[in-house]
Amino acid sequence: LAKDMKHLFYNGNVITMDPTGRVADAILIEGNTISDVGSYHSLKPEADSKTIKIDLKGKTLLPGFIDNHTHLGEWMKRKTSANLESALCCDDVRKIFVKYRKKLKIHSEPQNCWLIGYGLHKHKLSDYNLINRKFLDSISPDLPLVLATFDLHTKCCNSIALKIAGITNQSSDPHGGSVGRFADGSPNGFLYEKACSLINDYLPQAQDISEANELFTSALEELYSYGLTGVHSMENYRSYLKSQDDLRDKLRICWHIYHEDKGDVIANGHRSYTGDEFSKFGTIKLFIDGALGSESAYISRPYTNNKDNYGYPIIYKEELTKILEDLFSNRLAVSVHSIGDSSTEIFLNSFEEIRNNKKIEIPSGNRLEHLQFLSKDQIARIASLNLYCSLQPVHLSFDIPVIKELCSPDLHPMAYPFSTLLKNKCRLGFGSDAPIADINPFQGIYYALTRADSSSPENKGWFAEESLNSIQAIAGYTIGGAEGALSNHRLGSLERGKLADLIVLEDFENKPAEYWKDAKSLLTMIDGKIVYSQL
Ligand SMILES: [Zn+2]
């Protein structure tokens, strides 16, 4: 992109999301930077004969969206793998893999190029009993091939895949799983339950997504059509290293690395929020509790189906304090998975203790992830500790019925307190946790606005007093997302000197909330480059 290349968008509704809430009708981009926002009349003289002028025809222009919690490698892996969901017989499986293979760029070391299929519904397959290593060899005699059932509890590998993973006649069954065998004792390709981990370490992470050229491009297009110009991704260290180059200049990414890889992170001298705006090293991701659906989120009232179960913490305060002190003294901030209020209590107690001790300098940018239940007291403490809150409004679509069924009514008003967080001046941003939920931020905006409860008559808003207006919801995906990477001085709003990440939408001001359900970006610009346009 030429540094002197200019874009002038005019005749629109430019919602800047700056602190003053300014709305203008034009914006001028120079190279990758916003050079001015204002009236067309005042910006026109700055345009020259080479400036690309885009008439917005009354449409709305916003900063690009940032999803502050994804597992992008996993999402990309699904998008760039063969999708077996539609298969009804073995022949369908063969056809899907053959078609998939044509889209792959087979590189010089074919053994590193895997054919991976997800989503096989074994009960839908009339001749599932024919699937085994030999059948898969007939589809792919030369490249490793693995298929996974829809529930991910079973995998089946061809001979090359088994060889790469070192699975032989002598392999023993791991604890909690088994290796499928033919009558002669040789592996038949199947790996059940925990035995799936025998192959998982060998499967390419996001690193080989660019090998699936066409699929990689269409996955990116999908993100652009959702208005996404950046995401935060939770990854292991290895996939962080390998994915960076594939995604550079295509999507802005802030990487958060799982705690089990902190050895690599520290040994390689990483510090939180270093790097550049295309690839930023974020935080270390920790877990304090589990999830609501599996009744392992740690909450202050017992689950209604078992009065002895409050969920449980994965780590207690003393251990957490040690972990945090170690990370903080290495200049690493944390992103803490905490769903239940009792879990968040552990974190707040530990964090306050470290802060009060004053022995260790706490790096900025510490984050709390999910926060499905928060007490008023906790919200006040989060605000005073300046902790960043990452919430996933789209999870309301499946969580409301679970909360109603499993959680004490005392907890219900504490769930997803969007509005209370804002009133208390908490730093708040939104994400999807994709592929757990739809990565499309428009879905999140819809649920932040409506808190629609599909289990109620008329799809009523659940604790509607916690709903946001559209600008507040958009803030969670723009300036709020940028704050979660300490990038708010460069991204998240349309201000002079900031990087030119922007999207164009229909004018939504007078549209009903339903608009957001099917909304699409009409144009997506990243770093001054138009990467997607339906305008
Ligand atoms: Zn997650």
Image: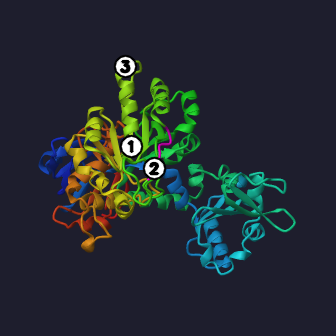
Of the numbered discs 2 and 1, the one sitting upstream in the chain is 2
Gap in Å between the C-alphas at discs 3 and 1?
25 Å
Eye-nearest disc, 3 or 1: 1
Relative image position of residue 24 (x, y in whole percent): 15, 50
Q: Nearer the viewer, residue 170 or 535?
A: 170
Q: Which of the 4 quarters of the picture holds residue 106? A: bottom right
Eye-nearest disc, 3 or 2: 2
Q: In the rendering, which numbered label is found on residue 311? A: 2
Q: Secondary structure at mark 3?
A: loop
Which amino acid does the dot numbered 3 rest on?
A: Lys
Tell me what residue is drawn at x 53 percent, y 27 percent: 269
Relative image position of residue 152 (x, y in whole percent): 59, 61
Q: Secondary structure at mark 1?
A: helix
Asked if 515 appears above or below 73 in the picture, the reply is below
Asked if 482 appears above or below 327 in the picture, the reply is below
Q: In the rendering, which numbered label is found on residue 342? A: 1
Relative image position of residue 316 (x, y in whole percent): 47, 36
- Image color mode: rainbow
Whether tag 3 and tag 2 are in contact, CB under 8 A, the answer is no
Gap in Å between the C-alphas at discs 3 and 2?
32 Å
Tell me what residue is drawn at x 38 percent, y 41 percent: 344
Residue 314 colored in magenta in the image: yes
Of the numbered discs 3 and 1, the one sitting upstream in the chain is 1
Magenta stretch prevailing secondary structure: loop
At label 3, counting other C-alpha atoms closer than 10 Å, the crowd grade (few under 14, some 14-19, many 20 or more) is few
The residue stretch that appears in magenta: 308-315
